[in-house]
Image (cartoon, rainbow, N blue to C red):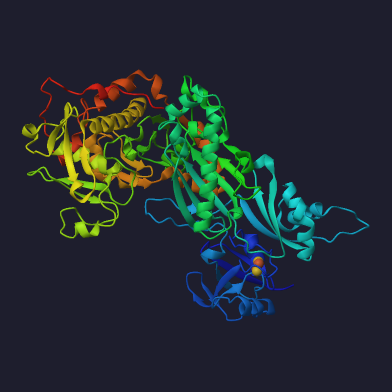
Amino acid sequence: MPEDALVIFTPSGKRGRFATGTPVLTAARQLGVDLDSVCGGRGICSKCQVSPGYGEFPKHGLTVARDALSEWNSVEERYDQKRGLKKGRRLGCQATIQRDIVIDVPAESQVHKQVVRKAAAERDIVMDPATRLYYVEVQEPDMHEPSGDFERLADALRDQWDVEDVTAGLAVLRKLQPVLRKGNWTATVAVHRGHDSEGHRILDIWPGYSEDRLYGLAIDLGSTTVAAHLCDLRNGEVKASAGVMNPQIRFGEDLMSRVSYSMMNEGGDVEMTKAVREAIDTLAIEVAGEAEIDPKQIVECVFVCNPVMHHLLLGIDPFELGQAPFALATSNALNLTGADLSLGSIHGDAQVYILPCIAGHVGADAAAVALSEEPNKSKDLVLVVDVGTNAEIILGNEEKVLACSSPTGPAFEGAQISSGQRAAPGAIERVEIDPATKAPRFKVIGCDLWSDDPEFADATAATGITGICGSGIIEMVAEMRIHGIVDGPGLIGSPEQTGTDRCFMDGRTYSYLVWDGTEDGGPKITVTNRDIREIQMAKAALYSGARLLMDKFEVDTVDRVVLAGAFGAHISPKHAMVLGMIPDCELDKVTSAGNAAGTGARIALLNIAARAEIEETVHKIHKIETAVEPRFQEHFVNASNIPNAVEPFPILGTIVTLPTATFNTGDGDDTGGRRRRRRA
Ligand code: FES
């Protein structure tokens, strides 16, 4: 009987006794240590690398001798010569245990490694993608025991990897025979693990051992923009990201106008479906090009989108979503293929996962935000606001979670604002107004200097000063309110009322001059009273959604606020609160989550368990339909004031003192904008 040796794995701390001669990989498997292997211990893939530790380990009460592992063998020697093995590393499938030892599994050898995300506020993702590579040795055919090559491949997957119930499409069957023979009855297979009942699907096969990388796309399909992140399915690395305008904008800027387009134009929905699918296909080619890979290596896609985009992506007429009771064709998560969505640029058998929708107005994008921000696991009461053309609002804690969506319209994205533009170099993104002169100074995207810096003109010569983006307009209006240029009801004052001739008569109301670049052929950037109305409507829609959820929760305050959305990271909490976009809250309790819906898509792409988790979570989220809630309208009217006609905002009061004067002299007030328009 060979002697037993104690083996301790780090960082997991798992330990056990093994007979001398046991390969490290075998010991790791028996203890459930996360050590990778694609070739199944055949010394080909090098994924099983470990770092043995020698000497004193007082923590473990162990002294490890130099000969605690078997000698360096010929397989390791060959691998080291051909590809190079880092100093001190061994191949876990080759090195065998001889005496007590401590073995470290480096991060790159772990299957379920954590993808550490850049921003501190972001949550790490544990890698467990649905599609993985397996190396197999397949039995050669035998005339006396006739069976198909595919059946023997399935046997190999079952016997060597415990992968059962495999299926494959025609494309794989067509290449199977030449591949197996070329690889001398060895092959690397890409296998997609479906839902519980669905078994496994072979997506592709290569002869012998292949390092072919697999990629996935996480797509955030928004009403205004479509954003895609290309991720390496082995380590979760984002290889490239890109975004395009949603081409459906030409059929209507907001969701409701797209629903009406499909109602009023025969085949309108088909046209919109085609447009968005083509845009996604082109986007896939673009990100693949940026990462210098073949788009056919994209074997998985995960989508998050609002309900109207969801239906239009699937080719389902969104008609029912335009009218009460806002019934979805299906709210369940969907497992489809790229071919179902006519995505011709990616792998022919690419698998598509669409997150579940929460309700008729609360879509898979809100589910993705919930997956990323986990309000259901929060001890304190958190309000998550995903600011976009259609705001997704979630309020909750570990006891309960409520969600609604609110039609903010595209004003926060710079649309429908006279000098508004998308966030791009040259767009004003930060604003400060001088309390004495009432003149603004600002920063534009692409330049770190304030506009009153002597170097500013040179630094912005290339981009110019082109307009105001979403975060810029929020700061602009809030600063105008703080410095008495716009009043609580949202009226810009006259030069006499405001003390600055930057305010000038512009039709029936006043506008405020921000920047006049006309001398150098640039634009004249102003804020008109109509712009203020647009922002009032957008922020009132957002606030009243949040307030409605607070009513349902029977609270008047929240513990913290998370701003999400493509430009959520750029919103200044103070200015958002001056505007009354978000409830009164300590400023340091207002944080930004970046593009939480996109992050949720990435989590679902890289971790299959997260899919089951969010499918379960959405069932527990209570949906509130703002359109049928009478108090929504009341909140909306109150929230049209800056910051609010009735709510006190006491914490804000300790930070800034807002002027109380109003500018309405009773003639010519443009109040038409205060009626709320339903956008979707
Ligand atoms: Fe593949 Fe060790 S498991 S080289």
Please name whichever residue, 27 or 194, is drawn nearer the observer in this view of the structure. 194
In the displayed structure, 574 sits above or below 325; it is below
Task: Examine the image and state in which quarter residue 49 appears.
Answer: bottom right
Ligand 1, image quadrant it occupies? bottom right
Residue 39 locus on image (x, y percent): 68, 64
* In the rendered image, the vertical position of residue 463 relative to residue 377, given as above or below: below
Residue 173 visible in the snapshot? yes
**Looking at this view, is 214 or 110 the one in front?**
214
The residue under the point 11% across, 30% down is 660
Please indicate whether residue 346 sits to the left or right of residue 319 in the image.
right
- Residue drawn at 21 percent across, 37 percent down: 527
Which residue shows up at 36% across the image and 37% down it? 385
Q: Nearer the viewer, residue 296 or 89?
A: 296
Give coordinates of residue 119: x percent, y percent. 38, 54
State whether residue 69 is above or below residue 680.
below
| Quadrant location of the N terminus in the rendered image | bottom right
563 left or right of 439 in image: right
Residue 649 picture location, percent across and down? 21, 33
Query: Residue 583 location in percent, x, y?
Result: 27, 34
